[in-house]
Image: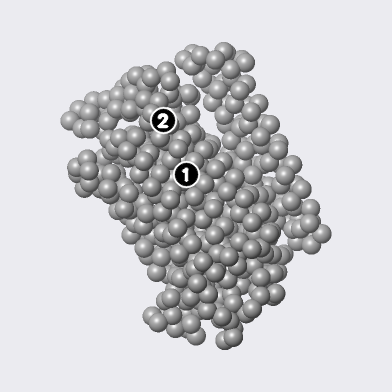
Amino acid sequence: RCRKARFGSTLASVFIGFSLATIAKDVYVEKLGASPIIMGVLFFIVSFCAPVGEIVSGRLQNKEALRRFFPLERWGRKAPWLLTHVVLLALASGILFIPPQGTFILHAWFLVVSVVLYWAISTCIIAFESCRQEIYPYNEERAEVEVLCKLGCIIGLSYAGIPLLILMAQASMVVRLGASALFVVGVLVWALPAAPVWMEANSVNSEDAPEASLCQDFRDTWGNKAFRHLCIVRLCDGLYQGIQATNMLYYMTYILKLKGAERSGFVVILGACGMVGDMSVAVLVGRAMKNRRNSYRLQAGVIWLRTLNVITTLGLLVLPMFLFGTDLHSDAGELHTDRLIFLVWTVVNRVCQSPFSFWRVSAQCWIVDEDIHLGDGTRREAAFIGVASAAQNFARAFAAAVSFMGYGFAGLQPLDCEGECAESLADSCVDLCMERSIEEQPDAL
C-alpha cells in the first residue's frame, strides 16, 4: 500500500500545477491589472494549444522519443517523461505569478507560461495513466489505486490552495515570491519519491509492430466505438468542469459578495466539506469495487448520481430566488442563507461526482487492454489517453474561456486594488477597494 500511495502522490504534483493553471487568469485580472477581454482571448488560444499538445505528447511517448537520453532497460518507458516534465512543471509553476512589469509583457507572459504549464501537466498525466495501465493490471488493484489517487489530487489542491487563497486576498511581490517558492518545492517533493515506481512500466513494443504516423494513431484509436463514446463523455465532463470552475469564483464574489480574507476562509470551508464528501464516497466505492460483480454495476450508479446532480444543482441554486426574490441580495441574513445553500450544493455536487473517476479509469483501462490483446503488438496506450484527455481538456479550457470572455463583454472590470493601495498605510484600504469594485460592476454582469 505504501508503494501505491507513493504512486498516487504523483497526482499531488500534477494538481498543484492544475490549480495554478485554473486560477491564473483570475489572479491576473483581479490582482495584476490584466484586461478581462484580452485574458479571455488568450485563454481561448490556450484552450486550442492544450489538446494539440496532448495528442503530440502521446505520439512522442509512443515513439519513445527520450530513449536516446534515458535507456529503456534502466528507466522504463514512462519514467523519463514524468521525471523531465515534473521538473518543467515546477519551473513553470514558479514563474507564473511573477511576470515582468508592462501591459504587453504581462499578457504575453501569461500566454507563454500557461502553454508550457499545460504541456507539462498533459505530458505528466498521459505518462502517469500509462504507468497505471501497465503496473496495476487487475481491476481490484486499480480501484484501490484510484482511492489513493483521489487522495493525491486532494493533497495537491489543498497544498496549492492555501498560497492561492493568500494571493487572492493580498498579492504583493513578496507574497507572490513566497507562494512561487512553495509551488516549486511542492511539485518536486510530492512527485519525485514515486520515481522508482514509474520505472516499473518497462514493457516495449513488439519487434514486429508496424511504424505508424500521427494520423494513423488517431485513426486506430478513433476506430474503436467504445473509445469514441468515452471521448464524448469526457468532452461533456470537460465542458461542465470549465463552466463550474470559472463561475464559482465570480458567483462567490459578485452574488454572495465575499471578498479578501472572508472569501478565502469561505473557500477553505467549501474545500474541506467537499473533500469529506468526495473521499467518503470514494472509500465506499473502492471497497465495493473489490467485488468483481460491482464493476458491472458502476455505470448505472454513475448515471443515477449524475442525474441527481442536475436536479439538486437546479433546485439549490434557484432556491434563493424563490426565498428572497430575483434581485441581488444585500441583507446580511439573506446573504448568510445564500452562502449556506451554496455550501450544501458544493457537498452534494462532490458526492454525486465522486464515483465518475472510478468509471472513467475502468473504461479507459478496459479499452486499452482490449487494444493490446487484440492488436498488432503496438502499445498505443499513450495515444488513447492523449486523445481522450485532449477532448476533456479542450472542452474544459474552451468552456472556461467562453465564460470568461462573457464576463468581459458583460462589463467586468475589477479595480486594481493592489496598485491603488500600494502607497496607502491603511490596513483597510484593499478591503474597501474590493468592496467598491464589487458594487461598481454593471447590472448585466
For the residue marked with disc 2, what is the amino acid?
Answer: Tyr
* Residue 369 showing in the rendered view: yes
The structure residue drawn at horizontal position 78% and vertical position 57%, both measured from the top left corner, is: 296
The structure residue drawn at horizontal position 55% and vertical position 43%, both measured from the top left corner, is: 239
The structure residue drawn at horizontal position 54% and vertical position 60%, both measured from the top left corner, is: 387
Res. 382 image quadrant: bottom right
- On screen, residue 128 above or below 29: below
Res. 425 image quadrant: top left
Provide the residue designation for mark 1. Answer: 398
- Check the picture and name the quadrant holding the C terminus: top left
Q: Position of residue 244 (x, y in %)?
A: 53, 38
Q: Position of residue 289 (x, y in %)?
A: 74, 58
* 144 displayed left or right of 291: left
Viewer-side residue, 50 vs 176: 50
User: Secondary structure under badge 2?
Assistant: helix
Q: Position of residue 77 (x, y in %)?
A: 51, 76
User: Secondary structure under badge 1?
Assistant: helix
* 189 displayed left or right of 422: right
Provide the residue designation for mark 2. Answer: 407
Decide: few, some or many residues near mark 2? Use Cα within 10 Å; few <14, some 14-19, many ≥20.
some
Cα distance in 3D space between marks 2 and 1: 14 Å
Q: Position of residue 370 (x, y in %)?
A: 69, 69
* Residue 124 showing in the rendered view: no
